[in-house]
Amino acid sequence: MNGFLLAFKASRYIPAPVIHGLAWAGTMLQWSRRAKPTVRLEDNLRRVTGLEGDELRRLSRRGMRSTARYYAETFTLGRLSGDVIDARVRMVNAAPIHEAMARDGRVVVALSHSGNWDLVGAYACRNIGPVVTVAEVLKPREVFDAFVALRENVGMRILGHEGGSTFRELVRIGRTDGGVLCLLADRDLSGSGLEVDFAGQSARVAPGPAALAIATRSTLLPMMVHYERLRGRAAWRARSRWGVVMTFGEPLLPADAPKDDAVGHLTRGWVDFVGARIQEHPEDWHMLQRFGWTEGA
């Protein structure tokens, strides 16, 4: 059985503190051995921060700890009450998303693999609107199905990434059902990524958020998720020493984009925001895979 799937199934019977401890131990072992995911992470962090040597190693250690926190929290997400979910999430500049939902009944959100995007998805289902998102179809299929079940259990609707048919289904949902259409778009899975300046480096990112906003005539909002330490009553309410902050950028409107470069214009808009926020919170960018850098990748 796949190691991830085994861990996921076992997590149903293990106390949350033990899950956190095991996740931390596993990632620290990878970090100390400089396993392939750690090497990938360090290369990506070096590009967005410019750090080298010991400083980069210290940052990657914090990054691996943040990744462990994400997986441990995600494995136990289904155990949390609605009140605890709400207590773990704080929104910054939330007015644009509430305004878009009130006006149009839908909004497209572009975000990176940062913080805990599953937790904010659960929060959004409770406090903003129904969430629809796309997930990479992992192998073996059982792993993908496990992740889908976990996310659907907290209210999200998940589509497997299967090329053009997935995009057409997103457009249909956006036009007919509405909701919060969230796309993790820093890592391009389409094979047709747009070249942009990403945190000072040339990279290819997914065109999906911009194309979806144009096709559904929706506001496009960039969003960053990062962790924050909780103390006192806030930690007690959250049943955790850690919460997440979801920070929204200013709205990007398809109507304001030049007709001859609308997708590129909107894409650069969300990338500028997300890239800058990643530079502020690099330890929470969980990019342990090959990224779309166009130089020296």
Image: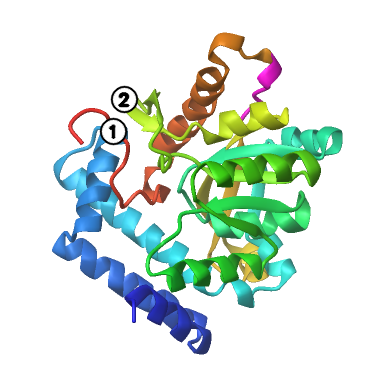
Label 2's element? Answer: strand
* Residue at x 64%, y 70% (from the top left corner): 236
Asked if the residue at tag 1 contacts the one at tag 2, i.e. Cβ–Cβ closer than 8 Å, the answer is yes
Main structural element of the magenta stretch: helix, strand or loop? loop
* Residue at x 70%, y 29% (from the top left corner): 219
Q: Is residue 9 above or below residue 34?
A: below
Q: Nearer the viewer, residue 240 or 43?
A: 43
Give residue 259's position: percent from left, percent from top: 61, 11
- Reading the image, the residue beneath label 1 is 293
Q: Earlier in the sequence, mark 2 or mark 1?
A: 2
Q: Is residue 191 above or below residue 62?
A: above
- Reading the image, the residue beneath label 2 is 202
Give residue 240's position: percent from left, percent from top: 56, 69
> What is the quadrant of the N terminus in the image?
bottom left
- Residue range in magenta is 249-255
* Residue at x 50%, y 51% (from the top left corner): 161
Residue type at mark 2: give it: Ser
Q: Could one spot residue 131 in this view of the protein? A: yes
Q: Could one spot residue 94 in this view of the protein? A: no
